[in-house]
Image: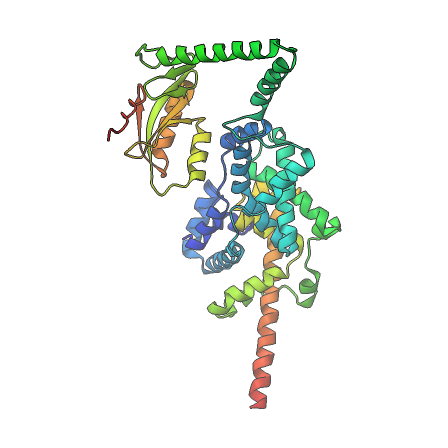
Amino acid sequence: MRTDSASQTRSAGSDLDNDTALYLLQRVAARDEQAFITLHRAMGRRIFAYALRLLGNHDQAEEVVSDTMFEVWRNPTRFEGRSRFSTWVLGIARHRVLDRLRAPSRLLDATSTEIDEALPAEDVSAFESVAAQERERGVRNCMDKLSDVHRECLHLVFYEGAPLADVAVLQDCPENTVKTRLFHARRNIQNCLRLLLINEGRASTRTANHA
Amino acid sequence: MPDLHDSMPWYVNRTLDGPMCAELARRLRNDPALRNELAFWEQVATGQSRLDAVAEDIALQRTLERIRRETGTHVARRDAPASRQAPVRSLLGRLLALPEGWLRPALACTLLVVVAQSVALLVTRTDGHNLMRGSATHDETAGAHIPADSVLLRVAFDPAVSEAQMRLLLARYQASIVAGPGEGGDYYLAVPSQRAIAATDGLRAAPAVRSVVGVERLPAPRPPKTP
């Protein structure tokens, strides 16, 4: 039942196994450039994607990559293999993203207020009502309008392919909160799609009247 | 069953397993509403995975420059660790700087004699032997250094494999290249003996590897071509 898109999502999160990461980090502790470059290549794009999703700025996202990997270079022995290597690195990246947002409370705000208040949540059929070819564009537009914490949650689940427990660790919250965040994210995307449908309906009505 | 709905995103990203995954798969066959929900999350997953192509080396140069600038560390190459070379250089420097007058050329000559004798010893050793286990050894057959307590594997990598993939595989099994590539593209790897079985099995299972064979020693060096 699972489609190609799902497997693509999973492959985006393919991981260095912890044994390899620990070995390379030992080499980094001995100031081995090649080991560091291997780790940088394994994680650079993923850190960039994560930072870009939240900051929306290429230059700042590159800075986050550099800041994060510089921290790995300075403290390679801090990773003890208790979590996945990528979870540890993305945890460092998250702090650097928060620094740049300059308002940490922004990431703690779990609601997309403007969409929440625009419509009641009883209609969850908007996704099915949008023509298939419009869905992709609509869903992507609506994801961009979500709050930071909801976008972060979707990124970790679907781009990183992270299990529930890892998302909870990275977002520093209980697993049930992660589930609640995804529930709200889905509802907000549905509401946003419904707004798009209404606006498109108005536009087509105006066009028909002018004709 | 609200948990079933809550678990759908992890069904889509393929990290859900156990009874919940089986139950969800079963219910999806009979429940159109659940299938719509699945379609929604798959659309979200597709949207998330679409980021513009990003270079593998993104920000790498910036990070390396920053390391050099802010820590004053000159990052070392694996094959020539600065930490090992620096003390040797400084010791030689101090030895040559200490004596005054006629003592300096005398000391330099003595050092030259010691080096020449060491080279002569290495060149004239002719004990043909199998690979020594349990101590560092020098395989005269191919002139390669075999790390202590290691076994040799002859490995043929897929021609399409990247250097980074090879490096990752080597790192995973603590293997090092001691010879190759040969005419057939084979490499000879030294692997710590306690990891030999895991390395052999792991390399054989790796898509980037075509074949893995345990060998006793390195191949004899090819004779130089005569005109």
Q: Is residue B111 above or below residue B45?
A: above
Quarter of the image for residue A57 reads bottom right
Residue A191 shown left or right of residue B143 in the figure: right
Residue B79 location (% of width, % of height): 49, 27
Q: For the point 35% across and 22% down, which residue is it?
A: B152
Q: For the point 59% across and 90% down, which residue is it?
A: A210
From the viewer's side, name the closer residue of A86 and B40.
Answer: A86
Q: Is residue B46 above or below residue A196?
A: above
From the viewer's side, name the closer residue of A102 and B68.
Answer: B68
Residue B13 location (% of width, % of height): 49, 48
From the viewer's side, name the closer residue of A127 and B18.
Answer: A127
Residue B1 location (% of width, % of height): 53, 50
Res. B56 in view: yes
Q: Determine the residue located farthest toward the left in the rendered image.
A: B227
Residue A179 shown left or right of residue B136 in the figure: right
Looking at the rendered image, the quarter that the C terminus of chain B falls into is top left
Residue A5 location (% of width, % of height): 45, 54
Q: For the point 67% across and 33% down, which residue is it?
A: B72
Q: Is residue B95 above or below residue B206?
A: above
